[in-house]
């Protein structure tokens, strides 16, 4: 009997004593093994926007899994209201704050008491140690996808946004079978781990997002030296989170072009999805 299974509407994966749950979008039509994409959320956690992105991929013929990485106590702190409080504090913070855990902790300590718990949670999820664990959670998700009859286990990619963009790159460092990874305005993975990447990588960035975009040449150089295929594009006039049509920084022209690039990239790296462009 096959160990593979039929996908439900959602999924749950067990790893290291905890569960990773998420949303699963499966294409309509005759059942057949298809390429799959892991859709990785922003620092706000899994929300309707990321579920919508997963559905968009399913409409293009991909099985799309959108995991929620912030479960348990972390999820109780990272509520929409708390996140709004944190973003008010971060609006005028130095752009390099999220790249330096010690600076972030010092900054959080200066903020009003009601904002400190969520800022501390932000600091935690962006710390190298936590992100290393999240990468292993994501590898458990790709492992789960490979058990599904609807998925071709040799054709799996990832795409992430902001925090998720960083995690898409980190996933590529721990899953050597990942075929393609897309980074939307995410921080670079640890440069010492770049040689572990076997996937092709596409990076999409906004010109008006200096804290992230200024680091892309360093990543490109590390990719080149490691022999990793890396292509990137910077959108003039676009800010951080330009792809998210539920956020103030949404930039329609850039988002539309980025979607075309992502579909072309996955089409080239993962093979036919069973659906033409829409």
Image (cartoon, rainbow, N blue to C red):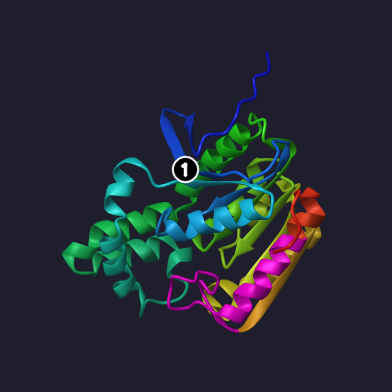
**Up-down relation of residue 60 to residue 99 (above or below):** above
**Up-down relation of residue 257 to residue 266 (above or below):** below
Residue position marked by numbered label 1 in the rendering: 22
Question: Where's residue 93, x and y in %?
Answer: 37, 76
**Residues in magenta, as a range:** 237-264
Question: Where's residue 71, x and y in %?
Answer: 37, 43
Asked whether residue 244 is drawn in magenta, I would say: yes
Q: Nearest the camera: 4 or 204? A: 4
Q: Is residue 237 visible?
A: yes
Residue 188, picture quadrant? bottom right
| Residue farthest along the front direction in this orientation | 29
Q: At numbered mark 1, what does the secondary structure look like: helix, strand or loop? A: strand
Question: Where's residue 256, x and y in %?
Answer: 64, 74
In the picture, the quarter occupied by the C terminus is: bottom right
**Up-down relation of residue 13 to residue 241 (above or below):** above
**Up-down relation of residue 265 to residue 26 (above or below):** below
| Residue farthest along the left direction in this orientation | 113
Classify mark 1: residues with Cα within 10 Å, few (<14), some (14-19) or many (20+).
some
Seen at 49% across and 54% down, the residue is 51
Question: Where's residue 171, x and y in %?
Answer: 61, 47
Asked whether residue 178 is drawn in magenta, I would say: no
Q: Nearest the camera: 159 or 15? A: 159
In the picture, the quarter occupied by the N terminus is: top right
Q: Is residue 214 visible?
A: no
């Amino acid at each position: 009997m096959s160990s593979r299974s039929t996908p439900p509407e959602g999924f749950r994966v067990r790893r290291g004593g905890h569960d990773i749950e998420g949303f699963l979008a499966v294409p309509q039509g005759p059942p057949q093994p298809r390429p799959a994409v892991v859709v990785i959320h922003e620092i706000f956690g899994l929300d309707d926007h990321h579920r919508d992105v997963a559905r968009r991929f399913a409409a293009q013929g991909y099985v799309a899994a959108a995991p929620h990485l912030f479960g348990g106590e972390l999820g109780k702190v990272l509520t929409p209201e708390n996140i709004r409080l944190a973003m008010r504090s971060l609006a005028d913070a130095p752009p390099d704050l999220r790249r330096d855990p010690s600076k972030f902790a010092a900054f959080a300590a200066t903020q009003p008491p009601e904002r400190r718990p969520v800022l501390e949670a932000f600091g935690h999820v962006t710390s190298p140690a936590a992100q290393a664990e999240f990468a292993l959670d994501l590898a458990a998700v790709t492992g789960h996808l490979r058990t599904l009859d609807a998925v071709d286990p040799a054709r799996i990619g990832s795409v992430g946004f902001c925090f998720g963009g960083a995690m898409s790159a980190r996933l590529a460092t721990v899953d050597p079978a990942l075929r393609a990874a897309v980074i939307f305005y995410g921080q670079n993975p640890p440069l010492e781990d770049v040689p572990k990447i076997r996937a092709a990588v596409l990076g999409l960035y906004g010109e008006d997002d200096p804290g992230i975009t200024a680091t892309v040449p360093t990543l490109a150089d590390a990719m080149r030296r490691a022999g990793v295929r890396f292509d990137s594009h910077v959108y003039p006039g676009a800010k951080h989170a330009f792809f998210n049509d539920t956020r103030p920084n949404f930039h329609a022209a850039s988002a539309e072009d980025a979607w075309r690039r992502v579909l072309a990239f996955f089409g080239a790296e993962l093979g036919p999805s069973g659906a033409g462009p829409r």
